[in-house]
Structure formats: C-alpha cells, structure tokens
Image (cartoon, rainbow, N blue to C red):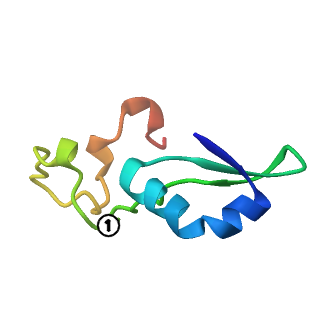
C-alpha cells in the first residue's frame, strides 16, 4: 500500500495508476496526514449470462419452470 499527499498524487498520478494497474497496488491519498481517498485496482465484472463453472455439470431433464402437479408436492404442503 502506498500513501501519498494530495500534491504528490497530482504530480505522480500516471505513475501511481501504472502501479495500481500492473502490481495491483492500493494508493491512499492523504490531506494533512489524514486519509481521504483510496485508489484500488478495478475488478472486472463477470458476464451475468455466463454459465457458472461449478454448475456446468447440472442437467435438468425436465423444464424447471413448469408447475408441479398435486402428487409432486410434499404431503404437508398439499391443500386439503
């Protein structure tokens, strides 16, 4: 983790961004010796439509969106 004052952050911004990008470094920007901001590496968001590798082995043999018939419900949940 790198800690810099605001003047130094303005002066060395390109260098600090390069460290964040290449070394996954965190930069704390301080004013009067007190932290006021934190620069952290950007985390790429995953595609929400991409199949989860842990669930790739799961196979549905029926359509899970179809309603259950009366016999498929647990007996305690069936309506009288």
Give the position of the N terminus as an image quadrant.
top right
Mark 1 neighbour class, 10 Å CA radius: few under 14, some 14 to 19, many 20 or more: few
- Residue at x 35% of width, y 65% of height: 48
Is 10 displayed left or right of 47 in the figure?
Answer: right
Residue 58 visible in the displayed image: yes
Residue furthest to the right in view is: 32
- Residue at x 90% of width, y 49% of height: 32
- Residue at x 71% of width, y 60% of height: 8
Residue under label 1: 47
Q: How many discs appear?
A: 1
Where residue 25 sits in the image (x, y, percent)? 49, 47
Q: Secondary structure at mark 1?
A: loop
Residue furthest to the top in view is: 76
- Residue at x 52% of width, y 69% of height: 14
Where residue 73 sits in the image (x, y, percent)? 34, 41
Where residue 2 sits in the image (x, y, percent)? 60, 44
Q: Is the residue 11 above or below the residue 28 in the image?
A: below
Q: Which of 76/18 is in front?
A: 18
Residue 43 visible in the displayed image: no
Q: Which of 77/32 is in front?
A: 32
Is 1 displayed left or right of 51 in the figure?
Answer: right
Q: Which of 1/75 is in front?
A: 1
Where residue 66 sits in the image (x, y, percent)? 27, 62
Is 31 displayed left or right of 1 in the figure?
Answer: right
């Amino acid at each position: 983790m790198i800690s810099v004052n605001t003047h130094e952050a303005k002066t060395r911004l390109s260098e600090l961004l390069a460290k964040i990008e290449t070394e996954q470094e965190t930069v704390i920007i301080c004013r009067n010796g007190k932290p006021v901001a934190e620069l952290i590496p950007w985390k790429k968001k995953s595609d929400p439509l991409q199949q989860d590798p842990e669930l790739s082995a799961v196979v549905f043999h029926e359509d899970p969106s179809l309603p259950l018939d009366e016999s498929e419900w647990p007996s305690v949940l069936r309506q009288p």
